Image (spheres, rainbow, N blue to C red):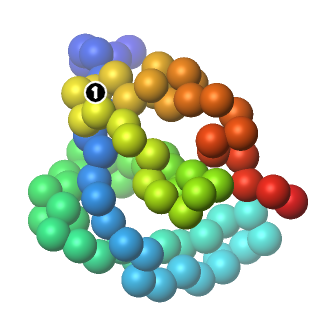
Amino acid sequence: MSSGPSRYKIFDVTLKESVAITPSLQCCVFYGADVANMTRHAPDQRIKVVLTLASGEPPCLVDNGEWYPAWLALPAATYLHPA
């Protein structure tokens, strides 16, 4: 049962360290000014990691809780990296 609508927040952070726990689980440590604004509401809280675009630039996503529709509106060639 949900306590209400969920609202996502975008944080501008940089990867500091990454450790493979298992082949499908990675422990990542991030740093940056926005880390201080993060809160933890549950021990199993998940995050979404948005990688840079194929151009190397970060995607332009508005931090209004509705970033996902903006992400979906991007042309696939914008965010798909060549294999």
The residue lying at 57 percent from left, 52 percent from top is 53
Give the residue drawn at x 56%, y 29%.
74
- Is residue 14 something that shows in the picture? yes
Position of residue 22 measured from the top left corner of the image (x, y, whole percent): 73, 73
- As drawn, 55 above or below 72: below
Q: Is residue 46 visible?
A: no
Residue at position x 48%, y 73% from top? 28
Disc 1 element = loop
- Residue 73 as seen in the image, left or right of residue 34: right
Whether residue 20 is situated above or below residue 58 in the rendered picture: below
Residue at image point 13% right, 57% down: 37
Residue nearest the observer in this picture, 8 or 53: 53
Viewer-closest of 13 and 61: 61
Q: Which residue is mark 1?
A: 65
Q: Quadrant of the N terminus?
A: top left
Amino acid type indicated by mark 1: Gly
Relative height, residue 8 to residue 38 (above, below):
above
Task: Name the side, left or right, on which 18 lies relative to 34.
Answer: right
